[in-house]
Amino acid sequence: MDGNGRWAQSRGLPRSSGHKKGVDAVRSAIRTASEWGVKTLTLFSFSSENWKRPKSEVNDLMCLLKSFIRRDLSDLHKEDIKVCVIGARKGIPSDVLPLLQEAENLTCNNSSTRLVIAFNYSGREEIVYAAKELAKCVAKGEISSDEITEHLFSRALYTAEWSDPDLIIRTSGELRLSNFLLWQAAYSEFVFLDCLWPDFDQAQFEHALSEFDSRIRRFGSLVRNTVT
Ligand code: IPE
Ligand code: MG
């Protein structure tokens, strides 16, 4: 979700207005994903690197996340959406963490779209986390180092429970992955959009989905794979 700041700046507004408007785009994206039967929608809401921003902007982003959960959690629950949070728990402010946990606990048995909030998230950090988890298992003698496979490694990541993303959408014209789901993106399809995140509406999302639909995926083989 990129481009909130530029959306605001181009209108002569403070960056915080762009983030605020970005929350409406979040609501719209969740609705569209749910309508189209998207099994998992992962939103990169705050990276481990975003702490480098000015304190006031970090504070604005924390307040928006808190108010989003307070206002929208019961609706998400009604819509049978399951909220999951990925990222390092350590370092999350003490007034934010309980809300994230509440969202996960309340919706844990829901079974429509899974909404994954990547918060305090870094793809490299996640890979290091998984490596440490496996190293602990080896140290305890639960597995041998030779038993570590791609499958086992995937199971040690934050995303252990669900499959790799089929489609990664980045808004705002930037052509980077910016430390997002590095391991999981090995065979993802990418759609880069010029639109700024606050302008990412249902039509933009559907455009990305139809673009995805036109891609031929072979996963390195010569045989076309289809995803349902
Ligand atoms: C939102 O857009 C990303 C978040 C960290 C929430 P930006 O804040 O990166 O917007 P730009 O890139 O400055 O336009
Ligand atoms: Mg940005």
Image (tube, rainbow, N blue to C red):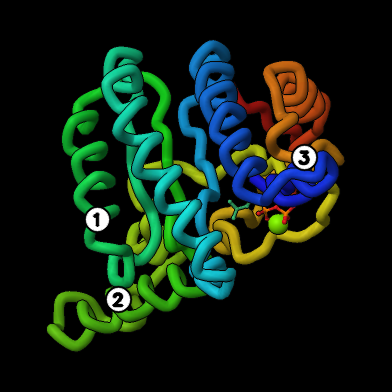
Q: Give the residue type at disc 1.
A: Asp
Q: How many labels does the image show?
A: 3
In this view, 36 is above or below 121: above
Residue at the image point whose x is 62% and y is 33% from the top: 21
Name the residue type under label 2: Leu
Q: Distance between the residues labelled 1 and 3?
A: 29 Å
Work out whether residue 32 or residue 102 is closer to the camera in this orientation and state it: 102
- Asked whether mark 3 and ligand 1 are closer than 8 Å, the reply comes as yes
Q: Which mark is residue 127?
A: none
Residue 228 lies in quadrant: top right
Q: Determine which quarter of the picture holds residue 208.
A: top right
Residue 213 shows in this picture: no
Mark 2: C-beta under 8 Å from nearest atom of ligand 1? no
Q: Name the residue under label 3.
A: 196
From the top left corner, tell me how far across and down residue 121 is, in percent: 46, 62
Ligand 2 is found in the corner quadrant, namely bottom right
3D distance between C-alphas at marks 3 and 2: 39 Å
Amino acid of disc 3: Leu
According to the picture, the residue beneath numbered tag 2 turns out to be: 134
Of marks 3 and 2, the one in the foreground: 3
Left or right: where 228 falls relative to 125: right
Residue at label 1? 95
The numbered mark, 1 or 3, whose residue comes first in the sequence reads 1
The answer to whether marks 2 and 1 mark residues whose Cβ atoms lie closer than 8 Å is no
**Left or right, residue 32 beside residue 132:** right
Residue 104 appears in the picture as rendered: yes
Specify the quadrant that holds the N terminus. top right
Of marks 2 and 1, the one in the foreground: 1
